[in-house]
């Protein structure tokens, strides 16, 4: 698989298994070791490449360990400290990384809980690990703009100088993007004041603050949705006046025989961003059984189909996202009879990962 596909497959694994992972050791085995192996490309069973429980005495501190040290040409290049996946990352977790960074040749340190990976270097002072990461990889919401820099840390194309040169820009651009995202999700008073002052001539009283906090959050979300929809329309070659919403279907959960002609009857079809995101999740789950290029999609007026080998007779799943009140994920049994499972959001597709894999397995024998 390509680098991006391996990362998507690992992200799907994390989503599917996170509820079963309760300890730091389980996090290492299920999430972090696969990241080192399949994403960074280092042999976790070769002590010349990956040293678990790496020890280097630091001053009066003796026998403290960093979870992993990645070696190249006999030198430590990357240090990795792990915490359990149920625990959000805090800079206080990086105490060993701070100490070891100054006594090894490592220029990259990673603090992770298996889901989020914070990458640090020494931009602020030579040979002293920064307090803030220059790159944050969140497997729950992968920022694809970071992948070229992440790939430079892999064994295959290791280019430390290039990563360090780009680190300062990555650090501040990434931090600004995360701050913008946080403000769009839950704007603070300063953010609300900024936009209120541009459109409102009255005093910024408590009542005005309460009113405009809600309005600013609503406007920000609508703006983002409109921009995403515009990009989607452009990508699909549709006009700006084409409606994104389609007629709703009945909410009843039904079972029906998959009919291969269903996908060929509709001529006026608009694919939504939500359907494409759902397709990517189903594809990532299916990649554990077949190569990604074998997973295809076709849209119809009443549902969005995910197929194996672009074959109508090999339906993996259907996304019924057109209803106003309820979304459904359609899965098929051995007789190709569909059962619709109600879902509240895209993340619930991962709860049906086993059913998706079973569909794929049936077609490949």
Image (tube, helix red, strand yellow):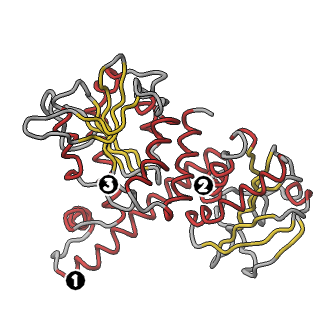
Q: Residue furthest top?
A: 73
Q: Name the residue under label 2.
A: 277
Q: Of 299 and 96, which appears nearest the observer?
A: 96
Q: Residue at x 24, y 71 (%)?
A: 200
Query: Mark 3 Cα within 10 Å, few/some/many (few <14, many 20+)?
Result: some
Q: Position of residue 166 (x, y in %)?
A: 31, 28
Report the side of 249 relative to 9 (left or right).
right
Disc sitting over residue 180 in the figure:
3
Q: Residue at x 78, y 66 (%)?
A: 302
Rendered position, 344 above or below 42:
below
Q: Of circles 3 and 1, which is in front?
A: 3
Q: Residue at x 17, y 75 (%)?
A: 204
Rendered position, 114 above or below 162:
below
Q: Of 156 and 266, which appears nearest the observer?
A: 156
Q: Is mark 2 on a helix, strand or loop?
A: helix
Residue at mark 3 to residue at mark 1: CA–CA distance: 25 Å
Q: Which residue is drawn at 92% across and 57% down?
A: 261
Q: Where is residue 127 in the image (x, y as percent from the top left)?
A: 16, 28
Q: Of 169 and 286, which appears nearest the observer?
A: 286
Q: Mark 1 points at which residue?
A: 207
């Amino acid at each position: 698989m390509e680098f991006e596909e391996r990362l998507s497959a690992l992200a799907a694994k994390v989503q599917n298994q996170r509820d079963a992972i309760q300890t730091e050791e389980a996090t290492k085995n299920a999430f972090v070791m696969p990241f080192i192996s399949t994403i960074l490309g280092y042999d976790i069973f070769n002590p010349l490449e990956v040293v678990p429980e790496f020890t280097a005495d630091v001053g009066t501190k003796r026998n403290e360990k960093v979870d992993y040290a990645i070696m190249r040409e006999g030198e430590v290049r990357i240090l990795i400290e792990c915490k359990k996946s149920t625990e959000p990352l805090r800079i206080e977790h990086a105490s060993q990384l701070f100490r070891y960074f100054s006594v090894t040749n490592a220029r990259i340190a990673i603090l992770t809980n298996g889901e989020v990976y914070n990458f640090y270097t020494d931009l602020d002072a030579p040979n002293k690990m920064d307090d803030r990461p220059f790159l944050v990889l969140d497997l729950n919401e992968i920022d694809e703009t970071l992948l070229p820099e992440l790939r430079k840390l892999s064994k295959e194309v290791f280019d430390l100088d290039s990563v360090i040169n780009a680190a300062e820009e990555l650090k501040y651009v990434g931090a600004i993007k995360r701050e913008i995202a946080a403000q769009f999700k839950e704007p603070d008073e300063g953010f609300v004041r900024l936009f209120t002052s541009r459109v409102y001539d009255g005093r910024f009283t408590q009542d005005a603050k309460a009113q405009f906090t809600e309005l600013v959050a609503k406007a920000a979300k609508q703006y983002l949705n409109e921009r995403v929809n515009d990009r989607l329309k452009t990508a699909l070659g549709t006009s700006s006046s084409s409606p994104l919403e389609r007629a709703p279907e009945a909410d009843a959960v039904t079972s029906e025989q998959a009919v291969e002609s269903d996908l060929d009857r509709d001529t006026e079809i608009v694919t939504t961003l939500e359907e494409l995101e759902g397709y990517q999740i189903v594809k990532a789950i299916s990649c554990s059984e077949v190569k990604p290029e074998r997973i295809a999609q076709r849209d119809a007026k009443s549902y969005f189909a995910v197929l194996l080998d672009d074959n109508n007779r090999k339906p993996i799943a259907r996304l019924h996202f057109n209803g106003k009140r309820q979304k459904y994920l359609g899965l098929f049994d051995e007789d190709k009879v569909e059962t619709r499972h109600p879902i509240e959001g895209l993340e619930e597709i991962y709860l049906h990962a086993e059913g998706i894999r079973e569909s794929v397995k049936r077609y490949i024998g």
